[in-house]
Image (cartoon, rainbow, N blue to C red):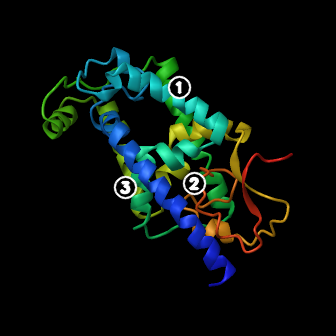
Amino acid sequence: MSDNELKTAAVKPLIWLRRAVQTGMLAVLGQWSFYGIFRCPFPVPFVDCKACPVITCWGRVTSLFWGFWLVLPISVLLFGRAFCGWLCPGGLVNQLIGKMSLFKLRIRNRFTGFAAWGLFAGLAASLVLWLYLGNPRWMVPIRAGEFWNSVRLSFEHATPFWLVRTFVVLGLVAAGFLVANLWCRFACPTGGLLELFRRFSLFRVFKTGACNDCDDCLKVCEMGTRPDEVNCTNCADCLGSCPIDAIKVGRKRV
């Protein structure tokens, strides 16, 4: 086996570990994520759960709600956007969709650089709706009942604003079949929030000064980026890709 093949083989257990962690988090947070899209009466989900009348939503579980909002800032300060690559249920769904996408868009050009600003546009829109407009209820909350029937009723009793919000989100996720991980790379408000603080993280996957910009790491990255750059989620999939061993994990020395 060549050196690159040995490196790739060494990284595979880490990739399987990440998938196992993502699957576990899907079991823990998955229902909450689906409620946030399909049954949450607020335009910005996951922030007003304690005031929400949808009694079957997992967000009303105090330990889960506060645990999430405790883990998120701690994770970004320790590991950057690792939440997106390791813990987020939506991230797993989008990555699986990305496996079937027509365009991986694993390139560096003006378009991909500009499109990443969509993360901050999504974050800004969410902050306006939540903080400035007070996160008003845009849908008559369906308090209980069988899940899919409740989803149907949610759409029947929603305001046009809620419908627009929901179909925009679903449309961007579905667009992942065209461009891999489009939602996570170019639209997710949570990703935009974590991106603001990613650079302050203690531990990260990063390039050393030996990097020659061959972009072999970018070609294997689900997020179409390079270590320690915009949209890097510290997933570590790129560790075995560098032909000159210029990718490291740990504290980056300035």
| Label 2, label 1: how far apart the Cα atoms are | 21 Å
Q: Find disc 3 in the rendering and name its residue.
A: 174
Which image quadrant is residue 118 in?
top right
For image coordinates 13% across by 35% down, the residue present is 146
Q: Find disc 2 in the rendering and name its residue.
A: 235
The one of 97 and 158 positioned closer to us in this rendering: 97
**Total tally of numbered discs in the picture:** 3
Instruction: Give x and y (percent) for residue 77.
Output: 66, 34
Pick the quarter of the image with the N terminus. Answer: bottom right
Residue type (three-letter) at the residue carrying disc 2: Cys
Numbered disc in front, either 3 or 2? 2
Q: Residues within 10 Å of mark 1 (few under 14, many from 20)?
A: few
Residue type (three-letter) at the residue carrying disc 1: Leu
Residue type (three-letter) at the residue carrying disc 3: Ala
| Label 3, label 2: how far apart the Cα atoms are | 23 Å
Q: Find disc 1 in the rendering and name its residue.
A: 70
Element assignment for label 1: helix
Depicted 186 relative to depicted 141: above or below? below
Instruction: Give x and y (percent) for residue 223.
Output: 56, 58
